[in-house]
Image (spheres, rainbow, N blue to C red):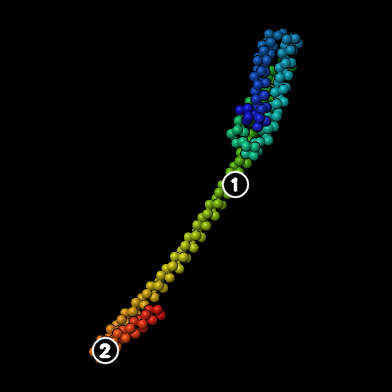
Amino acid sequence: MSSTNEEDPFLQVQADVLQQLSHTRPLFTSFLRIRSISTSATNPELVSARGELETNLSTIADDLADLVASVQAVQSDPYKYGLDIDEVSRRRRLVDEVAGELEDMKDEVAESRAGNANGQRRSNGMAEDAREDEAGGDNYAEFEQQQQLHMMAEQDQQLDGVSRTVGNLRQQASDMGRELEEQAEMLDTVDGLADRVGGRLQTGMKKMGTVIRRNEDGLSSCCIGVLIFVLIILLVLVLVL
């Protein structure tokens, strides 16, 4: 926790405010007790307790103003400062709670000073709180809207990436289809050549058999051998061509 406080000024001031508030609460309780038994607003003991309490409240108010400024600075873009939405909401609630408690104490002190006139100031304080809450609500709504726009932009980027991937796959499928068609045409051509060569081979074999049968009685075995050799050469030439 100490290393975190050193890195985040908000957490440092927050710790100081909470510590000061814990010391101020007993003073406030003592002030209320003295005021309840005092018969005069100028009672020395009451004046002393009130002065000490006002000093503490003033110090807390100064530090609280720093916390409020910090929350307002980060709530427009918390990710820029390494924070998330939940942490910003927690800080805003903390500031509101401390401000409310501080305002209650100030009202009691003011009431002890002004008596009945404090009623009007309390009403003004309540109206001011309402305006601050409304302004804070507007800021939070704007912050939520900015976050939604940010998420929508990220979703658009992701959809663009998916669209590009689908386009690449479609192009690859088209290329594969063309290659398969070309290979099919090549196979058809090879089949045609094989059929023609086979037909020529059969025709050549028939012719060779016919020639051999016609000449096997009138030619010598040597001539038959030469004829067979010539026919084989012709058959090879037919296959090659």
User: Residue beneath label 2, please?
Assistant: 220
Observer able to see residue 53: yes
Q: Quadrant of residue 98?
A: top right
Which label number is shown at residue 153?
1
Please identify the quadrant where the C terminus is shown: bottom left
For label 1, count other residues whose C-alpha is less than 10 Å away and answer few (under 14), some (14-19) or many (20+): few
Q: Amino acid at mark 1?
A: Ala
Query: Between tags 1 and 2, which lies in front?
Result: 2
Q: Is residue 58 above or below residue 240?
A: above
Q: Quadrant of residue 22?
A: top right
The x and y percentages for residue 221 are 26, 86
Residue 162 shown left or right of residue 199 in the figure:
right
Q: Amino acid at mark 2?
A: Ser
Of residues 127 and 48, the one nearer the viewer is: 48
Q: CA distance from mark 1 to mark 2?
A: 97 Å
Residue 227 shown left or right of residue 178 in the figure:
left
Of residues 215 and 26, the one nearer the viewer is: 215
Of residues 71 and 232, the one nearer the viewer is: 232
For label 2, count other residues whose C-alpha is less than 10 Å away and answer few (under 14), some (14-19) or many (20+): few
Local secondary structure at mark 1: helix
